[in-house]
Image (cartoon, helix red, strand yellow):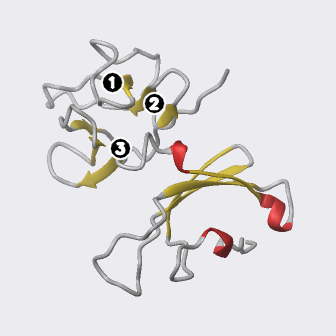
């Protein structure tokens, strides 16, 4: 393990507040909340962002991208939460700040922690490995949403020959 200094991405309190991590190949994506610890309850002046870390680079060059546009907008983002209620581990997807506030639920053998945001096409892709026959809304496959509104872009999930748990964009 090698520590990676993200202090250059900190807000005014000096802490970047790294929360969630995910990886794709040799890149790590780090969610930075940017809370203002000096003034509890007051939002930081900097918005939450995703930092992209390239593990094949060294030193300061490892941080290759820090861009608030990796969330939909300053006030519009997607959130995955988890519970253990129902027929299995459940994952819940919400579009915060969009026009559709519905929660997309999935029950599967494990929690879903991935999604892929395509800002060029304004689409969000969510892998739904739902395979629980007792859950009537089970629609396993890749769910596609309009990124800004939260509205479903397809009537049903894009079917695959396997239950997806991760998703990445490729052009």
Measured Cα–Cα span from mark 3 to mark 2: 25 Å
**Does residue 116 appear left or right of residue 65 in this picture?**
left
Residue, x 30% and y 52% (percent of image)?
Answer: 81
Query: Tag 2, which secondary structure?
Result: loop
Residue picked out by circle 3: 76
Residue, x 27% and y 48% (percent of image)?
Answer: 89
Please provide percent x and percent y for residue 77.
Answer: 37, 45
Q: Earlier in the sequence, mark 3 or mark 1?
A: 3
Residue picked out by circle 1: 140
Please provide percent x and percent y for residue 5.
Answer: 70, 74
Residue, x 59% and y 28% (percent of image)?
Answer: 169
Query: Tag 3, which secondary structure?
Result: loop
Choose mark 3 or mark 1, whichever is in front. Answer: 3
Residue, x 53% and y 78% (percent of image)?
Answer: 12
Q: Earlier in the sequence, mark 2 or mark 1?
A: 1
Residue picked out by circle 2: 164
């Amino acid at each position: 393990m090698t520590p990676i200094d993200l202090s250059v991405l900190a807000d005014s309190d000096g802490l970047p507040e790294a929360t969630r991590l995910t990886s794709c190949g040799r890149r790590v994506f780090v969610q930075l909340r940017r809370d203002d610890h000096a003034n509890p309850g007051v939002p930081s002046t900097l918005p939450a962002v995703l930092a992209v870390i390239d593990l094949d680079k060294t030193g300061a060059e490892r941080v290759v991208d820090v861009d608030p546009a990796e969330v939909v907008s300053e006030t519009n983002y997607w959130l995955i939460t988890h519970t253990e209620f129902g027929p299995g581990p459940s994952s819940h997807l919400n579009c915060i700040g969009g026009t559709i506030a519905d929660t997309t639920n999935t029950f599967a053998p494990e929690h879903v922690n991935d999604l892929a945001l395509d800002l060029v096409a304004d689409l969000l892709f969510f892998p739904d490995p739902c395979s629980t026959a007792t859950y009537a809304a089970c629609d396993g496959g890749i769910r596609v949403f309009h990124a800004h509104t939260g509205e479903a872009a397809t009537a049903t999930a894009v079917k695959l020959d396997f239950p997806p748990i991760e998703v990445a964009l490729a052009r």
